[in-house]
Amino acid sequence: MAGPLQLKVAVIGAGVSGLIAARELQREGHRLIIFEKSDKIGGLWVYDPRTESDPLSHEMVHSSLYFSLRTNLPRVLMGFSDFPFSEREYGDPRAFPGHREVAAYLNDFAIQFGIAELVRFNSEVVRVEAVDGRAEEW
């Protein structure tokens, strides 16, 4: 009997969804790489104070955060079942964590589960297509 199928998988983005997808794919024994457009783990939870002042500029600032943003969920409800947010100390005792805490939590999660080392930073994916029209290779 053959062992489980091991695939070479690309995950696009090192935000919440990308990190969870990567962890689960890794648990299933797949070889993976994560392409992250920015230079940090955390996706939309990484604050960038820059704005796009010139609509014709080629530089796009990808962020929907503002400086004082806090989550709308209390920390006891946030987090993953095997990596609770509420057990982490990030220096702010308030029930609703700010974006810095969420970004730090996601970074800690990536390190804890060996995902951080799989990330290729500053790697924007602009197109994905099948190789020679075959569905098994992209």
Image (spheres, rainbow, N blue to C red):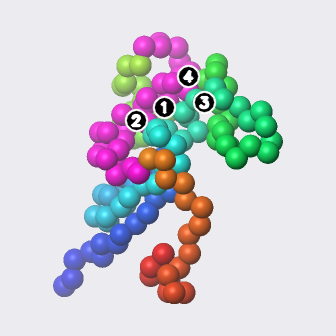
Magenta part of the chain:
91-120
Judge the density around disc 2: few (<14), some (14-19), many (≥20) Cα neighbours within 10 Å. some
Mark 3 to mark 4: distance in Å?
A: 14 Å
Give the residue type at disc 2: Asn
Q: Nearer the viewer, mark 3 or mark 4?
A: 3
Q: Disc 2 on helix, strand or loop?
A: helix
* Residue at numbered disc 4: 98
Q: Disc 4 on helix, strand or loop?
A: loop
Q: Disc 1 on helix, strand or loop?
A: helix
Residue in the picture at 64% in, 26% down: 49
The answer to whether residue 31 is above or below residue 89 is: below
Give the residue type at disc 4: Gly
Mark 2 to mark 1: distance in Å?
A: 6 Å
Q: Disc 3 on helix, strand or loop?
A: loop
Residue closest to the eye, 67 or 120: 120
* Residue at numbered disc 1: 103
